[in-house]
Image (cartoon, rainbow, N blue to C red):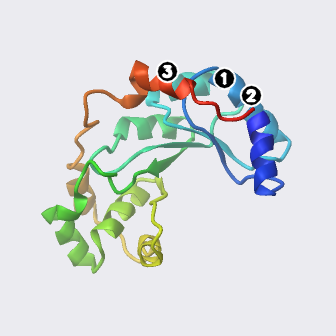
Amino acid sequence: KAGIEASLKKSGLDYFDLYLLHQAMGDYFSAWRALEDAYEAGKLKAIGVSNFYAHVLANFCETVRITPMVNQVELHPYFAQPAALETMKHYNVQPEAWAPLGGGRHKPYENVMLQGIADAHQKTIAQVVLRWNVQRGVTVIPKSTRQERIEENFAIWDFSLTDNEMAQINALDLGYVGEAVKHFNPEFVRGCLGVKIHD
């Protein structure tokens, strides 16, 4: 509750359009109750979560009073998470992708198949990858500080990928790449819990 009030005061706004609970760590059920209260008070127009994997989200949605409206997770062709999307659909939670272009671990811009699809639509690989997620019902939030890239990322509404193209991109899915999902790593969890967010 203190974090919401501090954020509103710092921003100079009366409400936020969307407010996310970033991790399923600490006493996140109590934190969620504060978001529910702020939502009902009109201070938050929508509330959601981030990095809630399918089993965590299912337990959460079955337990809380107001289910999350959004779950922001890593979603891109190399980590497509189809089972997670099914869980979100079941609970009517809107999936939102962070790192929708694959982050730094993957090299979609060097993929010949993606380039072929991009050429067929006279688009860039980034636009094809973003469009793929959008056609799966995913909200995308690509990060860029360059005006031309921001405009490029937005110009994905004038074409559609075919079923065959969607299937080709789906086939890039590698599952999670790494030794373990970092959110399950005890050292990562302890590190997050040791960070002071507000007074």
The residue shown at (71%, 35%) is: 198
User: Of the residues shown, which amino acid type is indicated by label 3?
Assistant: Arg
- According to the picture, the residue beneath numbered tag 3 turns out to be 190
> Relative to 185, is 31 on the left or the right?
right
- Label 1 and label 2: CA atoms lie apart by 6 Å
Q: Which type of secondary structure does the marked residue at label 3 adopt?
A: helix
- According to the picture, the residue beneath numbered tag 2 turns out to be 33
Looking at the image, tell me whether mark 1 or mark 3 is earlier in sequence order: 1
- According to the picture, the residue beneath numbered tag 1 turns out to be 29
The C terminus sits in image quarter:
top right
Q: Which type of secondary structure does the marked residue at label 2 adopt?
A: helix
**Percent coordinates x, y for residue 98 in the rendering:** 45, 50
Note whether 97 is above or below 189 in the view shown: below
**Percent coordinates x, y for residue 15 in the rendering:** 79, 52
Label 3 crowd (10 A; few <14 / some 14-19 / many >=20): few
Note whether 21 is above or below 55 in the view shown: below
Residue 26 appears in the figure = yes
Q: Quadrant of residue 64?
A: top right
Relative depth, front residue between 141 and 67: 141
> Relative to 145, is 8 on the left or the right?
right
